[in-house]
Image (tube, rainbow, N blue to C red):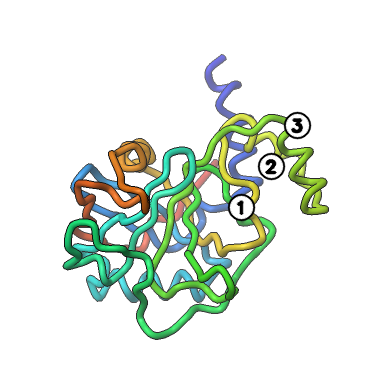
């Protein structure tokens, strides 16, 4: 009985993420509150390669999760956060270049998705600031209203995920999703629920101690 229950959930996951477990790279973030792991999608090669490059250069080591919002996202990667003082406004730091948007209909803001931040008035992604989606479970009525507001159609399998697992459907089509958390989503939840200031920065720093990347083994289903 348990096997029968698991199979439909797996099918939904794979339809939404587009064979995510066939991807080449896995990222591990060791934080002051626990570890988070995610795979990088091969269908967003510029974002994938940029993340691999920065992780191998130890760029993310000692950066903070500087923006945390329950039922929404946790965001980090601002280079200014490495030596930030208490209460310092963060979120504007960068590396002097942008990444062209790689927004794809099959890469959605479901719970656990990893996306790249960007300026509100520009489509290219930040070179270094990324976020992990937590989101919430949506009702059918909420999704219907979103479809009307944005004149879009949410596929049935994706509606199933947003109503049973959750995410942030209104971000779809606006930001590049380039990965998916495979372990440690509970750690991301803990980070999102820490006490924070008016700018959503944690009052007590949540730091990425070490971020590493490696090629993952090929996942075989059968």
- Marks 2 and 3 close (CB-CB < 8 Å): no
Q: Residue at x 26, y 58 (%)?
A: 64
**Quadrant of the rendering where the C terminus is positioned:** top right
User: Quadrant of residue 3 in the image?
Assistant: top right
User: How far from the left and from the top, in percent, is residue 30?
Assistant: 23, 52
User: How far from the left and from the top, in percent, is residue 159?
Assistant: 71, 38
- Marks 1 and 2 close (CB-CB < 8 Å): yes
C-alpha distance separating marks 2 and 3: 15 Å
Q: Which residue is mark 3?
A: 141
Q: Secondary structure at mark 1?
A: loop
C-alpha distance separating marks 1 and 2: 9 Å
User: How far from the left and from the top, in percent, is residue 60?
Assistant: 26, 66
User: How far from the left and from the top, in percent, is residue 156?
Assistant: 76, 39
Q: Residues within 10 Å of mark 3 (few under 14, many from 20)?
A: few
Q: Residue at x 75, y 31 (%)?
A: 141
Q: Which residue is mark 1?
A: 108
Q: Residues within 10 Å of mark 1 (few under 14, many from 20)?
A: many
Taking depth in this image into account, of 158 and 123 the one nearest to the observer is 123
C-alpha distance separating marks 3 and 1: 19 Å
Taking depth in this image into account, of 35 and 190 the one nearest to the observer is 190
Q: Which residue is mark 2?
A: 158
User: Quadrant of residue 212 in the image?
Assistant: bottom left
């Amino acid at each position: 009985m348990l096997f029968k229950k698991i199979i439909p959930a797996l099918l939904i996951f794979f339809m939404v993420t587009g064979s995510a477990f066939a991807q080449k790279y896995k990222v591990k973030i060791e934080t002051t509150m626990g570890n988070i792991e995610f795979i990088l999608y091969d269908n967003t090669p510029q974002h994938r390669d940029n993340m691999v490059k920065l992780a191998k250069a130890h760029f993310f080591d000692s950066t903070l999760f500087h923006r945390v919002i329950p039922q929404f996202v946790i965001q980090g990667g601002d280079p200014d956060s490495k030596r930030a003082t208490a209460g310092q406004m963060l979120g504007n730091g960068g590396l002097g270049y942008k990444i062209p948007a790689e927004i794809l209909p099959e890469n959605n803001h479901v719970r656990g998705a990893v996306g790249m931040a960007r300026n509100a008035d520009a489509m290219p992604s930040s070179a270094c600031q990324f976020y992990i989606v937590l989101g919430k479970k949506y009702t059918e009525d909420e999704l219907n209203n979103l479809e009307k507001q944005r004149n879009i159609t949410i596929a049935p399998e994706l509606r199933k995920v947003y109503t049973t697992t959750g995410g942030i459907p209104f971000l779809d089509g606006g930001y590049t999703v380039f990965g998916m958390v495979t372990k440690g989503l509970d750690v991301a939840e803990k980070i999102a629920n820490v006490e924070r200031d008016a700018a959503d920065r944690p009052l007590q720093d949540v730091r990425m101690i070490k971020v590493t990347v490696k090629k993952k083994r090929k996942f075989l289903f059968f």
